[in-house]
Image (cartoon, rainbow, N blue to C red):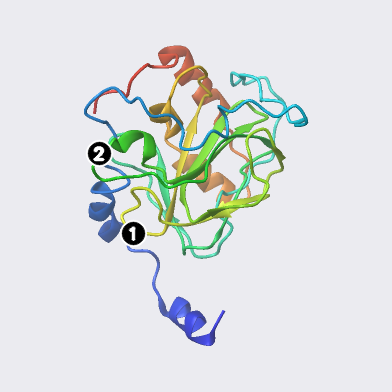
Amino acid sequence: MSSRSIDRRRTRSAYPILLLVPALLAGCTGGDRPAAEPSAVWDTPATAAQPAATDASPTPPATTPSPSRSPARRVFPVRADDVAYHPTHSTYPGTDIFADCGEPVVAVTDGTVLEVSRVDRFDKRGPRGPFNGGLSVSLLGDDGVRYYGSHLRVISPGVDAGVRVRAGQQLGEVGRTGNANNVCHLHFGLSPRCTGRDDWWIRRGVVWPAKYLDSWRRGGNRSPVAEVTAWEREHGCPGAPSAG
C-alpha cells in the first residue's frame, strides 16, 4: 500500500453512515421485490449442479437451527480496523457493514459453504430481488444458522458449495457489486436454511444482526440460534417476500 493511500486512510473520518443511508435506500436497501414472482435462481450453479463422479464433497444436508447445539466460536465477518455499521436496514432485517473495498470477509463460524455467486448479474432493469447481492457467499454454520454476505469484490479461490471452512477463514473481499450503489460494504444477513425454493428474500436476512455483530466485534460469542429458530417456527419458509 502506498504512503499516499495510508495518509488518506488515516485522515478519513469514520464512515458517514447518516450520509450513506439515503444512497443505500436507493441501492442495497431498496427495490428488493420484483414486479412478478421471481423465476431466477442463485446466480451460479454452485448449489444446483450435481457433483461430478470424482467429487467427494457432499451436498450439505438441510439443517434446522437448534438451541441445544454445542457452543461455537464466532468472529466478526470483516477483518478490518476501520469498519462501521448501522443497527437498522430499510424494509427487512439485515446490516450493511461499511469498510474499504478489498478488506477480508471471513467465515463467522465453523461450517459448510452453502451457496456461492461468482457472477454479478444485477441489472437495474430487473429482476432486482434475486440478483441484488452481486458476488455473494452463504455459510451454513455448524450451529444451523445461515450466515450470508454479499456485494463482494471477489470470492476466494476454493470457496465453493460443500467446502468446509473454519471461523475466521477468508471467504472473499469487501466490494460493491450488485445493487451496492457504488459504496464499498458487506451486506450481512442471518437466516435459517430453506431448501427446495429460490429463497433470496430469506437468505438476505430475517433477524436483526447488529446486537450479534456488537458482541463478536468485542470478542464475545453471542449466539443467534435461538432467535433464528424462533423465527423459523413462526414463519416456516415463506414462498414470497413479506410486505413492507
The Cα atoms of the two marked residues, 2 and 1, are separated by: 16 Å
- Which residue does the numbered mark 1 point to in the structure image? 182
Towards the viewer: 222 or 162: 162
- Which residue does the numbered mark 2 point to in the structure image? 31
Mark toward the start of the polypeptide (2 vs 1):
2
User: Is 212 drawn above or below residue 170 in the view shown?
Assistant: above
Whether residue 161 is visible here, answered yes or no, is yes
How many residues crowd mark 1 within 10 Å: few (<14), some (14–19), many (20+)? some
Mark 2, secondary structure of its residue:
loop
Q: Position of residue 94 (x, y in %)?
A: 40, 39
Q: Position of residue 125 (x, y in %)?
A: 23, 42
Towards the viewer: 44 or 190: 44
| Residue at (50% x, 17% y) in the render | 196
Q: Are marks 2 and 1 in contact (CB under 8 Å)?
A: no
Is residue 161 toward the left or the right of residue 229 in the image?
A: right
User: Is 79 drawn above or below residue 44 in the view shown?
Assistant: below
| Residue at (32% x, 26% y) in the render | 38
